[in-house]
Image (spheres, rainbow, N blue to C red):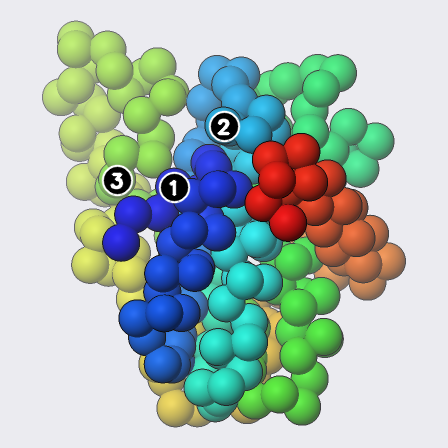
């Protein structure tokens, strides 16, 4: 089934089709991401990084919540990043309409992932649906394609050597995600953040209860406003 997290229409069509074809959903892993891209917009006009990395996952997860509850015990795993520690959360300019720094906006979207998981875990208390977020590590994937240093041919041997030393392979990079999704010891754990298969403390901004509530309300408002405009409500 096709799913484009840069399109609310695609997300809704995917969720509708999934619920028609499947009777249960045991694990939802929100893994899509775009990193440090030039300023661009989703199909619906949202800044691309916050649109895909946060708003797309927010909408998809909420569309699938009833099925997750029906399938409980079930798990939601949100991939964030160590990068959440490096950027401010831009409440005053949530969609980066006034300024744009590719790396800072990526960090902003990764803070949003953790805040979303934090608030959703609270809202799902007692449902036997757990929600946790994680940093998978620095993994050798195409996620870094917008950084110029990775696209300069003359530097390719140096970059390859650095990747071999500092980057995780894709299988190694998947381990914390697999741990959060499947480890029996985490059956009752919700609202946690993991790195290298261990509970890890997030930056203070990602533990802010009021900010998490604000993000939920603002995300819901932005999406519903756009859905009305698209006649998808």
Is residue 215 something one can see in this rendering? no
**Foreground disc of the pair 3, 1:** 1
How would you rate the neighbour count of disc 2 (Cα within 10 Å): few for under 14, some for 14-19, many for 20 or more?
some
**Foreground disc of the pair 2, 3:** 2
Query: Is there a contact, CB below 8 Å, between mark 2 and mark 1?
Result: yes
Give coordinates of residue 186: x percent, y percent: 47, 86
Q: Left or right: 92 with respect to 43?
A: right
Which residue sits at x=36%, y=61%?
Answer: 17
Q: Secondary structure at mark 1?
A: loop
User: From this viewpoint, which residue is outermost toward the left?
Assistant: 157
Residue in front for this viewpoint, 109 or 16: 16
Which residue sits at x=83%, y=31%?
Answer: 92
Give coordinates of residue 6: x percent, y percent: 46, 36
Give coordinates of residue 213: x percent, y percent: 81, 58
Residue in front for this viewpoint, 69 or 191: 69
In the drawing, what numbered circle is on residue 4?
1
Give coordinates of residue 159: x percent, y percent: 22, 25
Q: CA distance from mark 2 to mark 1?
A: 10 Å
| Residue that badge 2 annotates | 43
**Disc 3 or 1, which lies upstream in sequence?**
1
Quadrant in the picture for the N terminus: bottom left
| Residue that badge 3 annotates | 141
**Disc 2 or 1, which lies upstream in sequence?**
1
């Amino acid at each position: 089934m096709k799913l484009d997290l840069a399109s609310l229409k695609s997300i809704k069509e995917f969720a509708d089709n999934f619920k028609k074809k499947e009777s249960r959903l045991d694990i939802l892993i929100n893994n899509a991401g775009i990193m440090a891209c030039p300023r661009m917009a989703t199909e619906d006009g949202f800044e691309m990084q916050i649109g895909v990395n946060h708003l797309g996952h927010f909408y998809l997860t909420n569309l699938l919540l009833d099925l997750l509850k029906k399938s409980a015990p079930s798990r939601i795993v949100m991939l964030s990043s160590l990068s959440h520690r490096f950027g401010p959360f831009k409440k005053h300019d949530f969609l980066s309409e006034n300024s744009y720094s590719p790396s800072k906006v990526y960090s902003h979207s990764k803070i949003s992932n953790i805040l979303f998981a934090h608030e959703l875990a609270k809202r799902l208390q007692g449902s036997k649906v757990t929600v946790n977020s994680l940093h998978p590590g620095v993994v050798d994937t195409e996620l870094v394609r917008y950084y110029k240093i990775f696209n300069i041919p003359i530097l390719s041997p140096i970059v390859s050597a650095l990747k071999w030393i500092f980057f995780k392979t894709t299988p190694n990079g998947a381990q914390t995600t697999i741990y959060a999704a499947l480890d029996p010891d985490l059956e009752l754990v919700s609202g946690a953040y993991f790195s290298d298969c261990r509970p890890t403390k997030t930056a203070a901004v990602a533990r802010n209860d009021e900010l998490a509530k604000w993000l939920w309300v603002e995300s819901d408002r932005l999406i519903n406003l756009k859905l009305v405009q698209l006649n998808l409500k």
